[in-house]
């Protein structure tokens, strides 16, 4: 045997043995990565007790996991273009890129401007000098109704405000702008403002704002913005305290029509903010659901159990179709601001089924109790519901006989609403204007329950055919010179220059009809 042949034998031996061994090792590695039971058996230690992991909290009943195809660049560009297109003073509700949004947009120059979302309690003030002379910026104010955009919270944290976006994202100004929105925390000192410095379509990165520009009053957050992004408010009590927030309980149902055999009643558990109630109304529109009576406040605590809704009484001639007369709402669904609701379905009994043959079935009366689990004997709210076939609320309003009334210019209306809305220690706000218009204390207290008392009293002034001159004199008499100065800027305009029609279409269905309620 030659030396060359003998030297090649070890290499051939390694080749013949090494290939099967390497293949076996590769197969074992593949099994470890693709077979979970293999990994678990390999990682389990017999002498170490495994830590139990609590099951994840199930999503609310109305929150269906959604998977949408990734948006293309033209779709993203069209999304932001529509969001920043001026809305001519209107508040627009629209679904864009699978997100339900309420927004308003306008062009602002060096003189500044104000954006206001109607019936939402949200405003953005851009002061004079915030934009350089000779420049114009398109600015948008957006209420985000996509619940997946809210921050991920712990059990100790509760969402107490809407998610608000100011656009365009990242825009900066020469002077700070003021963003204002409502919150429902009972203790303002327990709240913290959060921001996500991300575009609206990107994954959110929520962090505490952590700067002195944010101020939280009894029911309002004000943030001084140096640049635009997303914002919200979270409540978390310090150690040794219990965090609480105010809920509003809203009851909805469709009209009771003659011959109707079934009626469904829905009770929403909402944050006590104007935009939450508006969300419920929008959610009820496809079902012809309408709000039944005023909302009731509920003291909700973050340290207690689930919310119970118990049916206590139903009038003769009707019966409960559901299997149970008590329903539960998971605590975190309410605490994290998911706007849950529970429903009862009632059936009209036939004549031979009713114990009392003379029991009227053309109306239904229902009584429900709601409380947090474990607190039934300490704190409970009673919900009463009544509907009849003869009620005028089920019929559409008459057409063709609109009451004659003057209209304030939309921008003036928004500026006056923003100036009169904040509560003053001396009462020199919308309440003083209501007194000058002849409203008594009971009617003023009723107005305080509206989503925007200032807007309600200004609409009442319009329905009384008040003129700008009369409103100017009222503001001077009230010593509200800031409002009088704003009105003075419109007194020199001709009647044709007042864009009344622009606001008439946007708010034609939002009148309070105070003459009927009072």
Image (cartoon, rainbow, N blue to C red):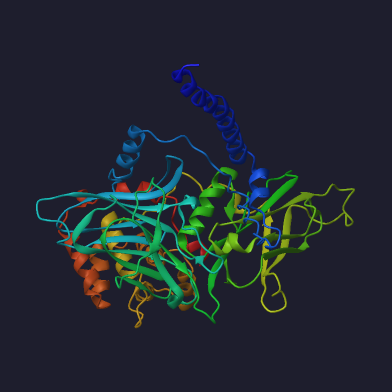
**Residue at 54 percent of width and 82 percent of height:** 240
Q: Is residue 460 visible?
A: no
Residue 4 is situated, as x and y percent measured from the top left of the image, at 44, 19
Report the front residue among 494 and 271. Answer: 271
Residue 80: which quarter of the image?
Answer: top left
**Residue at 63 percent of width and 53 percent of height:** 58
| Left or right: 513, with 270 as reference point | left
**Total tally of numbered discs in the picture:** 0
Residue 128 is situated, as x and y percent measured from the top left of the image, at 16, 62
Find the residue positioned furthest to the left.
134
Q: Is 396 placed above or below 304 here? A: above
Q: Is residue 60 visible?
A: yes
| Left or right: 140, with 460 as reference point | left
Residue 465: which quarter of the image?
Answer: bottom left
Q: Is 63 placed above or below 434 here? A: above
**Residue at 34 percent of width and 49 percent of height:** 199
Q: Is 111 placed above or below 245 here? A: above
Residue 344: which quarter of the image?
Answer: bottom right
| Left or right: 466, with 306 as reference point | left
**Residue at 63 percent of width and 46 percent of height:** 39
Residue 205 is situated, as x and y percent measured from the top left of the image, at 40, 55
Find the residue positioned furthest to the front.
1
Report the front residue among 265 and 204. Answer: 204
Report the front residue among 15 and 322. Answer: 15
Residue 12 is situated, as x and y percent measured from the top left of the image, at 52, 23
């Amino acid at each position: 045997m030659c030396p060359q042949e003998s030297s090649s034998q070890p290499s051939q031996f390694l080749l013949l043995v090494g290939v099967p061994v390497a293949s076996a090792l590769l197969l074992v590695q593949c099994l470890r990565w693709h077979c979970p039971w293999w990994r678990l058996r390999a990682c389990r230690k017999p002498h170490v007790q495994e830590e139990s992991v609590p099951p994840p909290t199930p999503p609310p009943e109305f929150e269906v996991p959604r998977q949408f195809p990734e948006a293309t660049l033209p779709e993203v560009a069209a999304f932001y273009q529509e969001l920043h297109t001026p809305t001519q003073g209107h508040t627009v509700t629209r679904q864009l890129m699978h997100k339900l949004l309420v927004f308003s947009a306008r062009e602002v120059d060096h003189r500044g401007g104000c954006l206001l979302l109607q019936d939402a309690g949200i405003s953005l003030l851009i002061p004079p000098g915030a934009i350089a002379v000779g420049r114009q910026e398109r600015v948008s104010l957006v209420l985000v109704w996509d619940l997946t955009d809210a921050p991920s919270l712990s059990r100790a944290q509760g969402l107490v405000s809407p998610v608000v976006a100011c656009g365009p994202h990242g825009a900066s100004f020469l002077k700070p702008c003021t963003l204002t929105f409502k919150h429902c925390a009972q203790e303002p000192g327990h709240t913290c403002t959060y921001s996500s410095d991300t575009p609206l379509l990107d994954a959110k990165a929520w962090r505490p704002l952590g700067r002195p520009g944010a101020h939280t009053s009894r029911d309002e957050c004000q943030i001084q913005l140096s640049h635009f992004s997303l914002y919200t408010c979270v409540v978390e009590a310090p150690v040794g305290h219990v965090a609480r927030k105010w809920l509003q309980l809203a009851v909805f149902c469709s009209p009771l029509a003659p011959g109707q055999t079934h009626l469904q009643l829905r009770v929403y558990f909402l944050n006590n903010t104007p935009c939450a109630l508006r969300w419920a109304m929008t959610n009820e529109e496809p079902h012809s659901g309408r709000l039944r009576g005023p909302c009731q406040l509920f003291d909700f605590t973050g340290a207690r159990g689930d919310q119970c809704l118990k049916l206590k009484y139903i009038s003769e001639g009707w019966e409960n179709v559901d299997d149970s007369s008590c329903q539960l709402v998971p605590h975190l669904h309410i605490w994290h601001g998911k706007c849950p609701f529970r429903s009862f379905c009632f059936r009209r009994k036939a004549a031979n089924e009713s114990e009392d043959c003379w029991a009227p079935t053309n109306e239904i009366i229902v009584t429900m109790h709601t409380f947090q689990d474990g607190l039934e004997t300490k704190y409970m709210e009673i919900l009463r519901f009544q509907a009849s076939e003869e009620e005028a609320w089920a019929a559409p309003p008459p057409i063709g006989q609109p009451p004659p009334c003057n209209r304030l210019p939309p921008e003036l209306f928004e500026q006056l609403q923003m100036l009169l809305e904040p509560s003053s220690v001396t009462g020199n706000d919308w309440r003083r204007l209501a007194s000058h218009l002849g409203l008594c204390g009971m009617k003023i207290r009723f107005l305080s329950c509206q989503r925007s008392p200032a807007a309600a009293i200004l609409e009442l002034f319009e329905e009384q055919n008040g003129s700008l001159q009369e409103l100017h004199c009222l503001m001077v008499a009230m010593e509200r010179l800031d409002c009088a100065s704003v009105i003075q800027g419109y007194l020199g305009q001709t009647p044709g220059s007042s864009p009344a029609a622009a606001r008439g279409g946007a708010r034609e269905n939002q009148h309070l009809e105070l003459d009927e309620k009072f």
